[in-house]
Amino acid sequence: MATLGFIGSGSIGTRIAQLAIAAGIDVVLSNSRGPETLAETVAELGERARAATPEEAARAGDWVVVSIPLAPYRELPVTALAGKVVLDTINYYPMRDGHIEALDSGETTTTELVQEHLAGAKLVKAFNNISDHHISALARPTDAADRSALPIADDDPKANASAVDLISRLGFDTVDVGPLTKAGALNRRPTPTRCRTPPTLTP
Ligand SMILES: NC(=O)c1ccc[n+]([C@@H]2O[C@H](COP(=O)([O-])OP(=O)(O)OC[C@H]3O[C@@H](n4cnc5c(N)ncnc54)[C@H](OP(=O)(O)O)[C@@H]3O)[C@@H](O)[C@H]2O)c1
């Protein structure tokens, strides 16, 4: 039985969790305020979902989605995430996160900052340039003619293969854009990069 852990269970995290459950994957959600604050979300997601602390969600996950604002990234649990494939959806918004000189100057990318903090984890930038409602609206089975592809960036071939497999199970093809040094290019495109045919969106 596969499990997907979540650190951050807001707009993006819960939509990815819905797709995971539809794919038969158990989910463990967490946030900054404690598992009890996720009771309603867990009830809506059903019996494959439970809530825990960030450390517990990290340890439980075969992969872990990190989907929080950038500012508190140093709170991510280093030991619990060591060795894990971590899908990082984080974007940098200076008005929300405060200015970070190394990002403003283009010296580094958000994912490299997070990777530096999570030294033992294998970061894969993913789901950061698709809006929350499109995650639900555009997910498709593998044989769908109008399946969308999401760009991913990472530094580890095994983590890449594992993330590609997971994202496919969630409903999307992937396009490799290269190493984490290239991940900054993904921050400025709020829509999926490519669809085989234009999607029909529900209002
Ligand atoms: N929304 C989009 O369309 C979109 C698209 C692409 C990328 N992104 C990026 O993805 C990330 C998440 O976006 P979102 O829209 O899902 O945000 P959101 O709805 O505000 O959810 C943020 C989640 O992060 C949790 N969190 C905050 N600080 C935490 C901490 N220190 N430890 C554990 N959990 C913490 C929050 O929990 P509490 O509520 O308990 O604090 C909440 O569950 C952001 O970096 C955003 O820029 C968003």
Image (cartoon, rainbow, N blue to C red):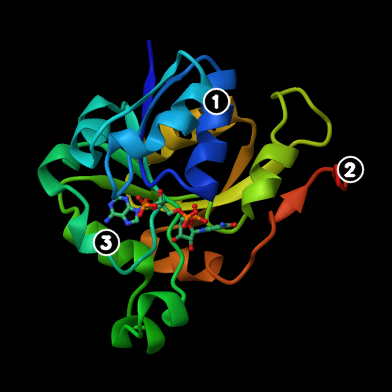
The residue drawn where x is 43% and y is 43% is 9
Q: Secondary structure at mark 3?
A: helix
What's the residue type where badge 3 is placed?
Answer: Tyr
Ligand 1 closer than 8 Å to the CB at disc 3?
no
Q: Which is nearer the N-term, disc 3 or disc 2?
A: 3
Q: Secondary structure at mark 1?
A: helix
Q: Secondary structure at mark 2?
A: loop
Q: Is residue 196 left or right of residue 123?
A: right
Q: Are marks 3 and 2 in contact (CB under 8 Å)?
A: no
Of the numbered discs in the image, which one, if any, rests on residue 200? Answer: 2
Ligand 1 closer than 8 Å to the CB at disc 1?
no
Of the numbered discs in the image, which one, if any, rests on residue 115? Answer: none
Of the numbered discs in the image, which one, if any, rests on residue 73? Answer: 3
Say above or below: 134 vs 139.
below
Q: Is residue 57 left or right of residue 43?
A: left
| Inter-mark Cα distance, 1 to 3 | 28 Å
Q: Position of residue 146 (x, y in %)?
A: 82, 36
Quarter of image, res 114: bottom left
Say above or below: 122 vs 17.
below
Say above or below: 73 vs 100.
above
Q: Which is nearer the N-term, disc 2 or disc 1?
A: 1
The residue drawn where x is 43% and y is 75% is 96
Identify the residue position indicated by label 1 in the image. Answer: 44
Q: Is residue 136 left or right of residue 144?
A: left
Label 1 crowd (10 A; few <14 / some 14-19 / many >=20): few
Q: Position of residue 52 (x, y in %)?
A: 27, 31
The residue drawn where x is 59% and y is 42% is 174
Label 3 crowd (10 A; few <14 / some 14-19 / many >=20): some
Q: Are marks 1 and 3 in contact (CB under 8 Å)?
A: no
What's the residue type where badge 2 is placed?
Answer: Thr
